[in-house]
Image (cartoon, helix red, strand yellow):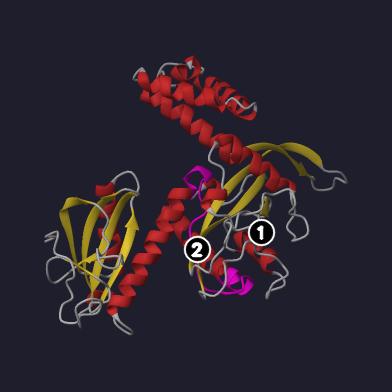
Amino acid sequence: MALAKRVMEPNDEGSAETMTRLAELITHLIDSGRERSVIAAINALSARGDADAADEVAFLADDAAQVLEIAVLRQAPGETEAEAVAGQAVLFAIPVLLIGDGERAAPVALTNEGADRSALDKAARSFRDAGLIGSEPSLVLTPYLYRVEDLPSDWEGWRRLHRALLDQRQSASSVSDLPVPSEGEEPGPDPLQLRYMLVSVQSALDESDPGPLITGTDDDSERDALIEAWAGAYTEILIAGLDGMWEISVGDPGEPDEAGRDGLELLNGCLLMMGIEEAAGEGQEPGTVSASIVGWRTPNGDLLTIGLEGKHGEFSGAWWVCGENMRGDIEAVREFLESAGVTRVVADEQIYEGEPRCKKCGEPLFPAVTREGLRHTAPDRHDPGSSTTEQSHTLH
């Protein structure tokens, strides 16, 4: 796109106007069903070596997926009628990890009709109560808990879903315009379920204080503290409102196009923390745990296996599903372990091919910490006298 190249020219005096025109063009193409034209432009710019221009087009397309232009009603002091002013609606996806009782399928919605008769209303108010949005913006929260496969995979789909969310109201009786989450043909009682809730914040473009969820803060630690406080309150609301869930973990509200990555980060972190606690044992600190990290290239994608051993020999393991950079994920796991208090962390430099599963029973295998080889989390599964069940790889 010529407009994209002009935006990136350092001496383009009309770059702001050009940027606006480019954003409007991209939004028009997406809304008119020509998203492929935007993708083709990104690929063409990349092929020509215009990586910055390609990134700018992709950024604007992602922004279009998250932000809708809307009219906001505002009533001035002393006036009897409200006037419509230019505004925006910004969409966020909230990853929610549900840990259930293992007897029932995960719920598909948070409503005001469960154990807590005002759960959905409380969840919506929590954003303002925690200081994430200002006093003027309005907010709409979807009651549904979506699987990642229920979420749109393209920019047009996100804009369509966002509009449906704006059309609904915060009550269990007005959700017919929103797509209903899929439960699958045979929903089972999997105790660990990753879901997503969607929230849209609407504010006037000239709003002086829409809140740090929209504008961020000068100090990242300040925003992090607000998010942490909100997440704690939001978690308690969900636990009270969702029957059959005995533990819930909530991630940060993020951009829709990053929902899959954000959810995976939440799932990985929770599984690893559970493994650390199991290896440490009841009442013991994570500092008593040692860890070993091994990377695998499996038919289903890259995976890290983490062996965790307590000071009295208690053994646990965790899987970490990798993104595009396994080496980066290894460092992320190391940082996570060290921030959790694990003091001894070893990472194998070699990357292995295959599935880290036992050839006899198919159960997962994890790297041993104090010896070589792979082992079950249950050491006596096949040989009561040995905790090492497979020696096909020397790991450290």
Query: Picture coordinates of residue 162 (x, y %)?
Result: 64, 43
Q: Is residue 60 above or below residue 384?
A: above
Would you say 91 lies left or right of 7 here? right
Say which amino acid is labelled 2: Gln
Q: Dot 1: few (<14), some (14–19), or many (≥20) neighbours within 10 Å?
A: many
Q: Quadrant of residue 141?
A: bottom right
Discs 1/2, front: 2
The answer to which of 285 and 352 lies nearer the viewer is: 352
Q: CA distance from mark 1 to mark 2?
A: 17 Å
Give yes or no for residue 279 being in the magenta stretch: no
Would you say 396 lies left or right of 257 here? left
Residue 3: mark = none
Query: Picture coordinates of residue 195 (x, y %)?
Result: 53, 58
Q: State the SS at label 1.
A: loop
Reading the chain from its start, which is encountered first: label 1 or label 2? 1
Q: Quadrant of residue 292?
A: bottom left
Would you say 61 lies left or right of 137 here? left
Q: State the SS at label 2.
A: strand
- The residue pinned by badge 1 equals 143
Would you say 107 lies left or right of 223 here? right
- The residue pinned by badge 2 equals 193
Quarter that holds the C terminus? bottom left
Q: Which residues are magenta?
A: 236-259
Say which amino acid is labelled 1: Pro
- For the point 18% across and 75% down, the residue is 387
Q: Residue furthest bottom?
A: 283
Labels in figure, total: 2
Query: Picture coordinates of residue 8 (x, y %)?
Result: 42, 21
Q: Is residue 182 above or below residue 55?
A: below
Q: Is residue 86 above or below residue 32?
A: below
**Does residue 21 show up?**
yes
